[in-house]
Image (cartoon, rainbow, N blue to C red):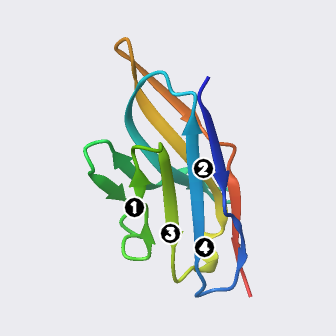
């Protein structure tokens, strides 16, 4: 059973920074990517960053330059470094892992961690 544990959420003022971390365990499949998504109140969940095993990283266009997502494949961890945070960044941030097992796609979500940006 895959388990994703997220940490590092909290409250910060506009312009501040936060770092989220996600650690995966119990992986019994071939990993294709790990990444971060977020869901703001009343909105759909959206991609923040997706890091492929090849090293290629895809960021949401609106966040590129403020957010970076370092990945440690050896430790099955991914972080999200968020800078110059804005109130619109307020959301629940979810870690996601995707891969393949006997030819079938598998994925798992973390429980989410709240990020609140306000004065």
Sequence-first disc among 2 and 1? 1
Instruction: Please provide percent x and percent y for residue 15.
Output: 58, 88
Q: How far apart in space, not on screen, are marks 1 and 3 (Cα)?
A: 14 Å
Could you tell me which quadrant the N terminus lies in?
top right
| x, y percent for residue 34 | 44, 44
Kindly identify which numbered label has been placed on residue 60: 1
| Nearer to us in this view, 28 or 56 | 28
Identify the mark at residue 94; answer none if there is no mark.
2
Residue shown at 58% from the left, 68% from the top: 19
**Residue nearest the viewer, comparing 93 with 88:** 93
* Mark 3: secondary structure: strand
- Structural crowding at the residue carrying mark 1, measured as other residues with C-alpha within 10 Å and reported as few (<14), some (14–19) or many (≥20): few
Badges 2 and 3: C-beta atoms under 8 Å apart?
no
Task: Name the residue at 74% across, 88% down.
Answer: 119
Which is more foreground, mark 2 or mark 4? 4
> Disc 2 and disc 1: Cα gap in Å?
14 Å
- Callout 4 secondary element: strand
- Mark 4 or mark 1: whose residue is earlier in sequence: 4
Q: Disc 2 versus disc 3: distance between alpha carbons?
A: 14 Å
CA–CA distance in space, label 2 to label 4: 15 Å
- Residues packed near mark 3 inside 10 Å, few (<14), some (14 to 19) or many (20 plus): some
Q: CA distance from mark 4 to mark 1?
A: 18 Å
Comes first in the chain, label 2 or label 4 = 4
Query: Which residue does the numbered mark 4 point to in the structure image?
Result: 18
Q: Is residue 104 above or below residue 81?
A: above
Left or right? Give the position of 71 relative to 8: left
Question: Local crowd at mark 4 within 10 Å, few (<14), some, or many (≥20)?
Answer: some
Tell me whether the residue at label 4 lies in contact with that at label 1, contact meaning CB atoms closer than 8 angstroms: no
């Amino acid at each position: 059973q895959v388990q994703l544990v997220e940490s590092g959420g909290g409250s910060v003022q506009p312009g501040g920074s936060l770092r989220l971390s996600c650690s995966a365990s119990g992986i019994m499949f071939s990993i294709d990517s790990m990444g971060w998504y977020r869901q703001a109140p009343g909105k759909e969940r959206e991609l923040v960053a997706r890091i492929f095993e090849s090293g290629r990283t895809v960021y949401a266009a609106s966040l590129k330059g403020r957010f970076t997502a370092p990945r440690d494949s050896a430790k099955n961890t991914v972080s999200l470094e968020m800078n110059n945070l804005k109130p619109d960044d307020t959301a629940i941030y979810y870690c996601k892992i995707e891969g393949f097992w006997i030819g079938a796609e598998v994925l798992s979500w973390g429980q989410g961690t709240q990020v609140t940006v306000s004065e």
